[in-house]
Amino acid sequence: SETPLANQSLILQSALGKSGNPYFTPTALEAPQLTGVRRVSTGSAPTYAKVGHGPHDVTYRFKPIPGKIYVLTLGSQFADHLVTLNQNGQTVTLPDSFNDTITVNVTPRNPKVEQVLRFRLNKKDAWFENFDLYQADAKQVIHDLKKLQTGSWHVIQHTATTVEATINILHDHQMLQTMIPTTPGWHVKVDNRPVTVKKSLGIFMAMPLKPGQHVITMRYVPPLSGWGAVITVTGLCLTACWYVVDKRRFSRHLVSRR
């Protein structure tokens, strides 16, 4: 289940030409509280089945540490609306469909408050495949990201919901990396054409770009969950870190480590 996070850590470390421990480490979760469900399998990836009338919930709790980023991994069995995930009263949006393990940002707004992750079963049973919680040191991640920062990003204009900027890409196989979390509601255009952003470190938005000058437009439509609820576009213009990554450099490091 750690494969997505391990790969993303390797990509960033390779871009920096460094090696060492992965950014994300597993965090143990206590046994969940079961409401209207029962466990019907053994092992590290349990299956829970509905019992009686609803609600049918599997609830985990964890106490966050200030300065840490928290990410869940969910296996492909969670696709197709298997569960509805709620974190401290707020719905966490999951993709409609996916074919492999995904990462979900559950970094709390207030790290002093115990976090409650409630999975409500939408079907008769649910296999908690590749379900794990990971944490990372936010300062370390941001420090390493800033090493790759570029000054070629120039904000043209911004409003409460939109930011527009230009960037000049000098080489082939480069990717624009942001420090904006991939929360639901963001819509990105490159040269007025919608693009699907990629995810870096399980959290941040990134997009590949061809050489030349480009106009990047980012807009979000609320509501947002997680970090997005406390981030404004104005704040992003002042604090966001942008850098360009050479994807070929990644490849050379990945090959050398095999």
Image: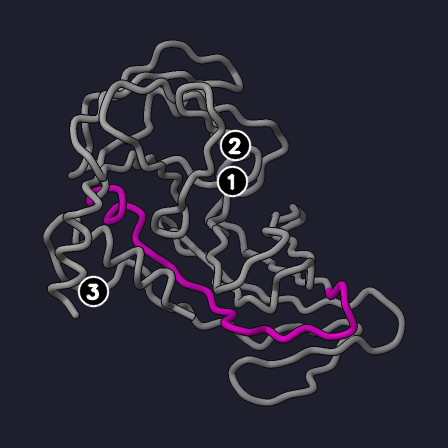
Q: Quadrant of residue 139?
A: top left
The image shows residue 106, relative to residue 188, as above or below, that is below
Using the numbered discs, state the Cα–Cα distance from disc 2 to disc 1 in whole angstroms: 7 Å
Residue that badge 2 annotates:
186
Residue assigned mark 1: 183
What secondary structure is marked by label 2? strand
Colouring rule applied to residues: one colour
Instruction: In this rendered view, identify the residue nearer to me: 231 or 101.
Output: 101
Residue for badge 3: 21
Q: Is residue 214 left or right of residue 50?
A: left
Residue at 35%, 17% (x, y): give it: 165
Q: Are marks 2 and 1 in contact (CB under 8 Å)?
A: yes
Residue at 64 percent of width and 56 percent of height = 85
Q: Position of residue 27 (x, y in %)?
A: 41, 68
Q: Is 17 on the left-hand or right-hand side of 92?
A: left
- The image shows residue 103, relative to residue 163, as above or below, that is below
> Mark 2 or 3 closer to N-term?
3
Q: Position of residue 195 (x, y in %)?
A: 46, 33
Q: Where is residue 22? Give x, y as percent.
A: 25, 62
Task: Provide residue 244's location: percent of width, then percent of height.
Answer: 22, 34
- Whether the magenta-drawn stretch holds residue 10 is answered as no
Front tag of 2 and 1: 2
Q: Residue furthest bottom?
A: 42
Q: Is residue 223 above or below residue 77?
A: above
Q: Which residue is found at the position 55% from the left and 80% from the top?
A: 45
Q: Secondary structure at mark 1?
A: loop
In contact (CB < 8 Å): disc 2 and disc 3: no
Q: If the image is split into quadrants, where does the C terminus sit? A: bottom left
Q: Which span is picked out in magenta? A: 121-144
